[in-house]
Image (cartoon, rainbow, N blue to C red):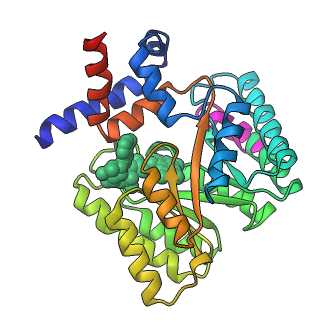
Amino acid sequence: MAATTHLSRSALMFLSRREGLKDMATRLGPLRELAGRFIAGERLEEAVDAVKALNAQGLLASFDHLNEAVRTEAETREEVREYRRLLARIDAVGVKANVSLKLTQCGLLFDPALALENARAVAAEAAARGSFVRVDMEQSAVTQATLDTVRALHAEFGEERVGAVLQSSLRRTEADARALCAERVRIRLCKGAYLEGPEVAFQDKRDVDAHFVRVMRVLLDSGVYHGIATHDERMIDATLDYAAKQRLPRGAFEFQMLYGIRRDLQVRLAKAGFPVRIYVPYGRHWYPYLMRRLAERPANLWFVLKNLVRG
Ligand SMILES: Cc1cc2nc3c(=O)[nH]c(=O)nc-3n(C[C@H](O)[C@H](O)[C@H](O)COP(=O)(O)OP(=O)(O)OC[C@H]3O[C@@H](n4cnc5c(N)ncnc54)[C@H](O)[C@@H]3O)c2cc1C
């Protein structure tokens, strides 16, 4: 059973890197339907409407413009323009939301200096509008470059404008968390969505979860405002227990979840008085993001297959 799950996860992660398949995939009605559950729309205004609805339920948001397939400097500049438009729109509409940004979108894979320049332009726009940029974490090959970039932006714009993401699947994460907390960098802690080898990552889910709990405690002890990003009720309960034990007030940290996943839990925690932020992806390039969500839970694939068979 575990081997089958691992196989389908690897296959889905392989497919997630084949953007060329998107054209074919998007013609599959059930896949589009499933995308509608996890992605707020292809256009900014659809995402803004989704965030208004979340805000009305007492939930905060973080917009993410999907596009990991940028290959040229011109495309990275277009991403910066989109993020500036997005930050202006958040400001104009007054929705309770910040933004999440991937450095590969800014050119990290082919020109790290360009990526820093682009991310800096987004952070400057956020700073001018009193907003916040969360720099998403991607595959382990770019972990160090991503953290170096976040540190440079954090030094320039400060704790309330730029933050990092750490993945409990990576062995290095507890050490990174301690160092970043000492520098007062805000962290989003998640399990990690990328397939990684044993030299850098824990392979057993129990180790990933135990590491998550250890790092969560480091974050909650730090006095910095962090995000605990998970839908796993055991991780959430461990966080609630530790926060109660340390007598932390409810606004000392926030929970974060993905758009379309465990909506019941999102609302339940918000109603209990905890800040809950929903990650709201939008844009035309939704294919790799959707495939990662399928890989996390291959059961989602049955939905697609069942509906395909039914025609
Ligand atoms: C706000 C936010 C931001 C994130 N940012 C990043 C990032 O920058 N880099 C990165 O590598 N990863 C990121 N992730 C993804 C994260 O690393 C995990 O892959 C993802 O959250 C699933 O892990 P989990 O903690 O929910 O636990 P799991 O043990 O995977 O899942 C726990 C439960 O959550 C539900 N669930 C989880 N995933 C799904 C799904 N796809 N479909 C349906 N139900 C599901 C199920 O009920 C499952 O039993 C982010 C996650 C969140 C919530």
Task: Say if the magenta span includes residue 309.
Answer: no
Q: Position of residue 290 (x, y in %)?
A: 45, 31
Q: Is residue 191 above or below residue 6?
A: below
Query: Where the C terminus falls, by quadrant?
Result: top left
Q: Which residues are magenta?
A: 104-117
> Which residue appears at 82% of the width and 51% of the height?
94
Magenta segment, prevailing SS (helix, strand or loop) = helix
Nearer to me, 200 or 44: 44
Q: Is residue 149 visible?
A: no
Q: Quadrant of residue 274?
A: bottom right
State whether residue 247 is above or below residue 158: below
Query: In the depicted view, which residue is nearer to us: 7 or 311?
Result: 311
The answer to whether residue 240 is seen in the rendering is yes
Residue placed at 66% from the left, 56% from the top? 150
Q: Residue, x 50% and y 53% (percent of image)?
A: 257
Res. 157 image quadrant = bottom right
Q: Give left or right: position of 39 versus 192.
A: right
Q: How many marks?
A: 0
176 up-or-down from 301: above or below: below
The spot of residue 156 in percent (x, y) is 80, 61
Residue 95 horizontal side relative to residue 290, left or right: right
Residue closest to the eye, 202 or 231: 231
Q: Quadrant of the N terminus?
A: top left
Q: Position of residue 91 (x, y in %)?
A: 84, 49
- Residue 104 spot, x, y in % from top left: 60, 36
- Verify whether residue 115 appears in magenta: yes
Point 14% across, 43% down: residue: 2
